[in-house]
Image: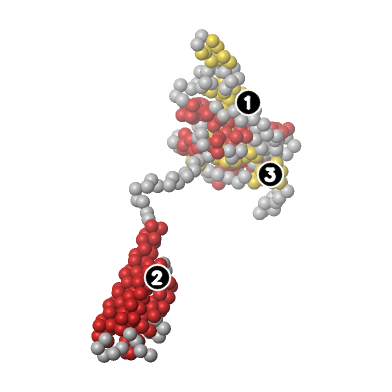
Amino acid sequence: MTTNASDLTRTLEALREEALRALDAAESEERLEAWRVAYLGRREGKLTLAMRQLGALSPEARPAAGAAANQVKLALDEGLARRQEALKERALERMAQAQRLDVTMPGRPVPLGRLHPTTQMLREVLDAFTSMGFQVAEGPEVELDRYNFELLNIPKGHPARDMWDTLWIDHTDANGERPMLLRTHTSPMQARVMEKTEPPVRVVVPGKVYRYENTDATHEWHFHQVEGLAVDEGITFANLKGTLYEFARRIFGPERRVRFRCDYFPFVEPGVDMAMDCFMCKGEGHLRSGGRSQPCRVCKETGWIEIMGAGMVHPRVLEMVGYDPQKYTGFAFGLGVERIAMLKHGIDDIRLFYANDVRFLRQF
Ligand code: DAH
């Protein structure tokens, strides 16, 4: 086979053009590698094959054609390197784009919860009493008849038991004692605390209580109470009054007045119901607006709001826990936490506290 120098040079030129065009179309590492094999591959590369034909040229034609072939080879090598570089750069750019972070962007808000209105009220009530020297104690919600009733001077079969609609539990405690129940009030802690302590006692007991009761706007089958107990030598009704008066003023405002009326609870004597003048109508029973008078709904036109039961601890109660009623006297009180919160915030349905509706909860 004779090889013509100018034919070979033309072939090389055409090859250069074709190869560089193909190079521009190679969009990936794999395509680039395929291109390299196709043109520069040692065995079957198109340029390799063309260069092999140099040997068939006449010695005079060979140097010029050889130089031309080398230039094409150089051009392809350079083209390959450039293309490789470009592809690498593009990949880096894409990566940077994906990881781009704008440090000037505002942070995403973290949703923050808040305390339940009952918890807030509970803490406020406890703060008022602890700042007057009371300690906080908690007791069991599943309680013995003995503490919930008997040690509070409410013996079995006593009609006063009807004051507390009770959820009884078919269960025996660790010492084999029964009957058990869900505590109907926080008062059982009076006996539990006194059994374990010598006077003086100043304690408040927050906690959940249960009643076998139909629910409506003012009744729930469970709610929270705070019990209070102070026992020492020489405690009088004046101490009870002073303490609870101070409490009312702290929670409902310094201008509050209080009223005590006789009430019956088997564990106190005398027993009272404490009320304060209505903070809405200032004890008037009606609200005046623009010369006209409107009935006050908060106190139901009475001017007074009942906020808790209280009294002087019954001597029998002291006796039953082993205190000498000749030496010690005391006062006790119990209040409903949701009721206080309802009064304070103007909430008209106790069921809202347990409905878990954030539209309600967010308001506190
Ligand atoms: N335990 C009573 C109840 O749940 C409230 C109460 C009244 C508690 C008078 C007392 C008290 O400590 O002295 O209805």
Choose between 209 and 36: the one closer to the eye. Answer: 36
Specify the amino acid type for callout 1.
Answer: Asp
Choose between 359 and 53: the one closer to the eye. Answer: 53
Q: Alpha-carbon neighbours of circle 1 within 10 Å: few (<14), some, or many (≥20)?
A: some
Give the distance between the C-alpha atoms of the residues marked 3 and 1, in whole angstroms.
Answer: 25 Å
State the residue position of label 2. 22
Left/right placement of residue 279 relative to residue 147 reads left
State the residue position of label 1. 263
Specify the amino acid type for callout 3.
Answer: Leu
Q: Secondary structure at mark 3?
A: strand
Q: Position of residue 85 (x, y in %)?
A: 33, 69
- Look at 39% across and 61% down and name the residue there: 95
Q: Nearer the viewer, mark 1 or mark 2?
A: 2
Q: Position of residue 151 (x, y in %)?
A: 64, 40
Give the distance between the C-alpha atoms of the residues marked 1 and 2, in whole angstroms.
Answer: 103 Å
Q: Nearer the viewer, mark 3 or mark 1?
A: 3
**Is 327 above or below relative to 53?**
above
Q: Secondary structure at mark 1?
A: strand
Q: Secondary structure at mark 2?
A: helix
The earlier-in-sequence mark between 2 and 3 is 2
